[in-house]
Amino acid sequence: MTTINDIARIARVSKATVSKVINNYPGVKEETRRHVLNVIKEYNYWPSSVARSLSTNKSFTIGIFEPVRINNFFFREVFEGIESVLGEEGYDILYLTNKLWENSWLKFSFKEKCINRGVDGVIMMGFGRVNLSEFDGLLNSNIPTVFVDLDLVGSNTSYVTSNNVEGAEMAIRYLAGLGHKKIAMIKGPAGFKLANDRFTGYQKTIHELNLEYNPDWVFSGEYSMETGYDAVNKIIKMRNRPTAIFAEDMIAIGAIRALRENGFSVPEDFSVMGFDNIELGLHYGLTTINQDRNGLGEAASRLLLDIINKKSFSPVILPVELIERDTCRSI
Amino acid sequence: MTTINDIARIARVSKATVSKVINNYPGVKEETRRHVLNVIKEYNYWPSSVARSLSTNKSFTIGIFEPVRINNFFFREVFEGIESVLGEEGYDILYLTNKLWENSWLKFSFKEKCINRGVDGVIMMGFGRVNLSEFDGLLNSNIPTVFVDLDLVGSNTSYVTSNNVEGAEMAIRYLAGLGHKKIAMIKGPAGFKLANDRFTGYQKTIHELNLEYNPDWVFSGEYSMETGYDAVNKIIKMRNRPTAIFAEDMIAIGAIRALRENGFSVPEDFSVMGFDNIELGLHYGLTTINQDRNGLGEAASRLLLDIINKKSFSPVILPVELIERDTCRSI
DNA sequence: CTGTTAGCGCTTTCAG
DNA sequence: CTGAAAGCGCTAACAG
């Protein structure tokens, strides 16, 4: 492996000089710079970023934590957004696994892991409002941190999220505009800001529009098709049925399938409205609220960079958009 | 940040001793070890892995390269497999971006990036048999490397893949067993080992079974629904039509949709057989060949670890399996 | 403009 | 069993 010493020796200069040209510092004669550059090119030398990290305390690496098994459609696209802006800025992304922690002889949590790996900042995604104390270390540290969809703030911590309240409001207004007065909602898992916000938007709008609010029409469960199945099984047994169902995409799709399997037709018998605009929705013609996933990732990265550079710490709320397809009809 | 020096000072021992206990080396009196351990715990000290990397030349980090926009269903699951075994072994995963290369003043390619970041090994996924010279640096280096679905080998390079030839053979034999004698194939993009292997299996089996081979029934294109649409548009215009279509899942789904939109029914008018078993296939009741994606990732990681430890370099070929659902019928 | 020197936090001989 | 010292590859004062 070629090191800075090799280059210095070959170019007959000191390594300080080589360092200066590598870093594009001033104070090097143009001739010397060119000469060193040539040697560097000839040997295809690239400075070790680990040595660099050690001496500068800056690694050009940002960490990502995700809870186990969150490796889904949604976050993959967020990740893509993250990658694109961070990559542009010369950062690589360290995907922090946490398998080893449990058996460890030390209390090794987010903060410690970040310090240990020397990341310049960290993005946390897929975490819910459960076990919030897990994050204490991070929040009280000075490690620049951005949460996706979890509104935690601290001196060096901020978050990005879609405007879920507004999205839910848009959904309900749309349904109401179509003539629906009885709208059910299947919420995501309790404890997630995202799910709570959407429910808030739902309740608020139902109220504002003077629609019928019926607690029996509110369901809750995991972000999966099963949740949709379960809710539909209850709904179809009701005497006073809702005419429309509002749920996150995956759940909504489960609901559509359940409805069909029970001989109902969408949107003739029930209108179904999603939230997220996952790719799968396309295959069901699902009317839904689009979240800009790439944008979420991009915003998270930019915010993180801003925090690192102490330029801004303000949370970012991204707008959402209604995508009209074929699962809702006017009644 | 607490360093080894702090611990040494506080524990009134030398940092060499602290190092020994951290690394669980012998030659430390049990009493001393316990004392040091207590101080470590009290200060929640964790050694900097970057300093460690610098001095040991081992980073417990493995790199992953993916071409841009390969962030799809398939590879996400492979990634999950990778993460699970590597995490278990104490490795973190460095997702190597390559955005900066182009404008760089240096020829900075896979190999250089790996050396620069000091990864212990690298997994390459989603690369096709195009521009193979890109990999020369890596192949000629001693950086442990595992390719997923690309059969490149070198002194420290190997690969993992599913048994695509056999999978295609299973598919064709199944279709033939159902009475089909005219089977079309829509291949994936040329240049990918995966696509080539599947085509090989197709041809071989068509031949062995004495089925009709008609070059007009062989199509090729990107791994997308459009490819399926395009092929179907040609197929339905033919006088001598195939009765079954064999294609990778995404393409097969495009074909099913195109068929339906043109008033044909699956499997009544055409049988459609996929390959990959992507999750989306479930929503179409697609009969397909399952690739063990998690297994692919796990195998890649294990192989990489073996290469790193110089234990084994043999490529791994994973078996596939036929998943019978509703898109094929006997005729 | 250039080079010397002292670290960054850790591991690893090698004496004691 | 313990510690002093050198060194991993680089950066950053500071002299010259």
Image: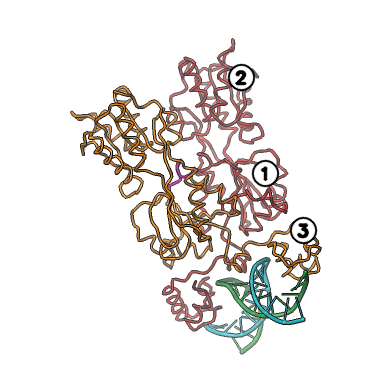
Chain colours: A red, B orange, C cyan, D green
Helix, strand, or loop for circle 2? Answer: helix
CA neighbours of label 2 inside 10 A, class few (<14), some (14 to 19), many (20+): some
Q: Which residue is mark 1?
A: A152
CA neighbours of label 3 inside 10 A, class few (<14), some (14 to 19), many (20+): few
Question: Who is closer to the viewer here, A297 or A252?
Answer: A252
Asked whether, in this view, residue B36 is left or right of residue B200, the answer is right
Tell which circle, 1 or 2, labels the residue nearer the N-terminal end.
1
Chain of the residue displaying label 3: B
| Quadrant in the picture for the N terminus of chain B | bottom right
Q: Which mark is residue B43?
A: 3
Helix, strand, or loop for circle 3? Answer: loop
The magenta stretch spans which residues?
A: B70-77
Where residue A207 appears, as percent x and y from the top left, is: 63, 22
Q: Amino acid at mark 1?
A: Leu
Residue that protrudes farthest toward the top in the picture: A239
Q: Is residue B263 visible?
A: no
Where residue C13 appears, as percent x and y from the top left, is: 65, 76
- Look at the image and say whether residue A22 sits in the magenta stretch: no
**Vertical side of A173 occupied by A194: above or below:** below
Q: Magenta stretch mostly in which secondary structure?
A: helix
Q: CA distance from mark 1 to mark 2?
A: 31 Å
Q: CA distance from mark 3 to mark 1?
A: 26 Å
Q: Amino acid at mark 2?
A: Trp
Where residue D8 appears, as percent x and y from the top left, is: 58, 72
Q: Amino acid at mark 3?
A: Tyr
Q: Which residue is mark 2?
A: A217
